[in-house]
Image (cartoon, rainbow, N blue to C red):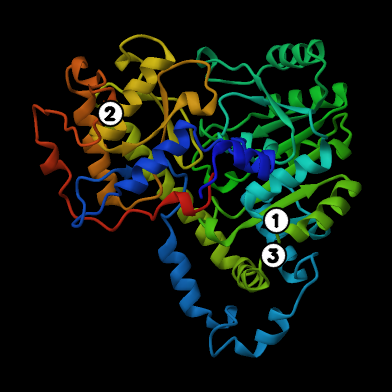
Amino acid sequence: MGFTVSNQQQLLSKMATGNGHGENSPYFDGWKAYDSNPFHPTKNPNGVIQMGLAENQLCFDLIEEWVLKNPEASICTAAGVNEFKDIAIFQDYHGLPEFRNAVANFMGKTRGNQVTFDPDRIVMSGGATGAHEMIAFCLADPGDAFLVPVPYYPGFDRDLGWRTGVQLIPVACESSNSFKVTRAALEAAYEKAQKDNIRVKGLLITNPSNPLGTVLDRETLRSLVAFINEKKIHLVCDEIYAATVFSRPSFISIAEIIEEDIECDRNLVHIVYSLSKDMGFPGFRVGIVYSYNDAVVNCARKMSSFGLVSTQTQHLIASMLSDNDFVDRFIAQSAKRLKARHMRLTMGLAQVGTSCLKSNGGLFVWMDLHKLLKEQTFEAEMALWHTIIHEVKLNVSPGSSFHCPEPGWFRVCFANMDDKTMEIALTRIRTFVLQDKEAVAPRKNNGFWQSNLRLSFQSRRMEDIMMSPCIMSPQSPLVRAMT
């Protein structure tokens, strides 16, 4: 006899039967659309191309070259097997000393060597997801809140709130000033929370921004420090895209700002980092909490027992990141290739009159399609998104899933595919944009979306556009790192 919904609610916890994970968001729905019909150059050339996954695959040739030259870095090779036992039985949740030293050095390099990091303050976690939850547990109680400038990464609702009971309060940002966070907006959000009897425990920022791809300037960072210092709340800085900045203005870490001669209680400042974006290692689940607060470091280290990085991974990472020549070359090449890919996408879109927010970091662009909306509403944005997913066969993420206050913006990831796939994707969207606006309107059949519909292109048939050979697109993101 099967369980009814009522039976489930009685037998299981509220977490098990609730919807706190947020998987019903359009952000995750796009991944499901890709998962059910993934593009392949020969097996499924009419499939959905994954442009909703912020993954850096542009420098894996450098990684593979290093691995082949350094077989002793892996305990599962003849050259490294002598260390197998010691690595396999290591259980200290502080992490391998050489791992923490190498990560601290790498964090310094990705920030232009403008600041150094103390290895003893590095706490490891299972990816940035685990790191964010860990810091939320350390800083806030259920019902407390963090202020977060919009638009922001959809996974934050899950990472910081699902199991902790912490709330996220949006800070209004607008396209009229390129979505820059202002002191006035921070004050307004803080005051509203106070009136609603919500205790604000911190401010969460992402620098470089996901989904904007922009960096915060020195003046803004100083203003944020002044704000949290005045309110006596925490500042959590997600800097997981630090090494993806490929042109000026340069990335400035909050670690650099607090070294300046400014008034700042360092106990209120914390950094979340990982190797998922800068190195392209989401599968390794290497997340980092770096706090200037001793109590937070001690608590987080104890909590890390629930999401440690495997010692095998620590050993490999320690060897790789201790190779300074390799690291310097990798950072330089990654920036060069990201710049070229970003330029190819934005220039290709500009040729058909589609603009993107000016950016110089991240693995994506913030594309403006508000002119294609039938009306300036979020319902129209979703209709356009459905067309792009099911007819144009591109998984791009709608701005509403990032809590964007204005309809018509979409995040488009560009670093998780090879050049040929990129060209196919660009051709699809350029051809689509050139069509009559009537083609943008959603098409329904008995109330349900037809996933097999095709647009009638004037210049070139979609089937021809989709046939160009390329390397296989990424595997389903539903079983991969979510950021």
Q: Quadrant of residue 135?
A: top right
Residue hosting label 3:
102
Residue kind at label 2, given as amino acid type: Trp
Residue at 60% over, 58% down: 285
Q: Which residue is mark 1?
A: 125
Name the secondary structure under disc 3.
helix
Q: CA distance from mark 1 to mark 2?
A: 40 Å
Front in this rendered view, residue 36 or 78: 36
- What distance separates the C-alpha of mark 1 from that of mark 3? 16 Å
Residue 480 in percent (x, y) is at 49, 54
Q: Earlier in the sequence, mark 1 or mark 2?
A: 1
Q: Quadrant of residue 105?
A: bottom right
What amino acid type should be assigned to the residue bearing mark 1?
Answer: Ser
Which residue was labeled with disc 2?
A: 449
| Quadrant in which the C terminus is drawn | top right
Q: Are marks 1 and 3 in contact (CB under 8 Å)?
A: no
Q: Position of residue 143 (x, y in %)?
A: 79, 28
Image marks 1 and 2: residues in contact by CB distance under 8 Å: no
Viewer-closest of 200 and 259: 200
Task: Tell me if 419 is positioned left or right of 174 in this view.
Answer: left
Q: Is residue 111 visible?
A: no
Whether residue 26 is situated above or below residue 57 in the rendered picture? above
- Nearest the camera: 264 or 162? 162
Residue 299, position in %: x, y?
Answer: 86, 51
Badge 3 amino acid: Ala
Mark 1 vs mark 2, foreground winner is 2
Element type at mark 1 = strand
Find out whether the residues at labels 2 and 3 contact each other: C-beta distance under 8 Å. no
Nearer mark to the viewer, of 1 and 3:
1
Q: Is residue 426 left or right of residue 157?
A: left
